Image (cartoon, grey):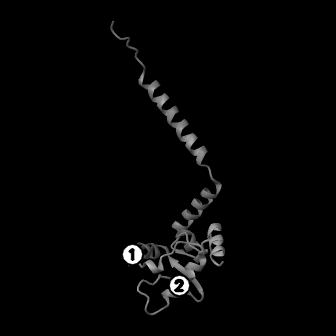
Amino acid sequence: MPGIEIEIPREAIEQIAREVLESMVGNAAANVHDEEAERIERTLQRIMAKQFITIPEFALLFNCSRGHVDKLLDQAQQPNCKYPLPYVDLNGLIQFDRLEVLEWARLRKPFDRKRRKTGGKKKPYPVAVNQEKKVAASRF
């Protein structure tokens, strides 16, 4: 028994494909909607449109703290600094040329395990409850 052939117009197939794609993209956008992410994206777009950026903009662009930026600026002023952060001091107002700092960030710098940053303050490891009992028992 030969198969049944149905002819579907190309326009109908394209319309169905468009509807499926729109529903998939629409669902993905609805699931990812995040106001904070949108705000950060708009801010980053403004930063990327500027030639010179401020310290808070630098910190946002590189996802680091203001204190870390201050530390990088202090290091840049030291005469023995091998990779100084490029900045412009406008009589106390610190600015960064966006393209220069992006290039600076891409430079290959030697990796020093002792200076590696993991973020946050280090907390001492808690003492296990059973270890306290062993110490107390060993005193007798």
Q: Are marks 1 and 2 in contact (CB under 8 Å)?
A: no
Residue at 37% x, 75% y is 108
- Say if 43 sits above or below 12 in the image: below
Task: For mark 1, give the secondary structure.
Answer: loop
Local packing at callout 2 (Cα closer than 10 Å; few below 14, some 14-19, many 20+) is some
Q: Amino acid at mark 1?
A: Leu
Residue indicated by mark 1:
107
**Tag shown at residue 73:** 2
Q: Nearer the viewer, residue 34 or 140?
A: 140
Left or right position of 57 against 85: right
Outermost left residue: 2
In the picture, the quarter occupied by the N terminus is top left
Percent position of residue 10, x then y: 41, 25
In the picture, the quarter occupied by the C terminus is bottom right
Percent position of residue 33, x then y: 61, 49
Left or right position of 29 against 1: right
Q: Amino acid at mark 2?
A: Leu
Q: Nearer the viewer, residue 52 or 65?
A: 65
Task: For mark 2, give the secondary structure.
Answer: helix
- Sequence-first disc among 1 and 2: 2
Residue at 64% x, 58% y is 36
Tell me the quarter of the picture where residue 2 sits: top left
Residue at 47% x, 80% y is 115
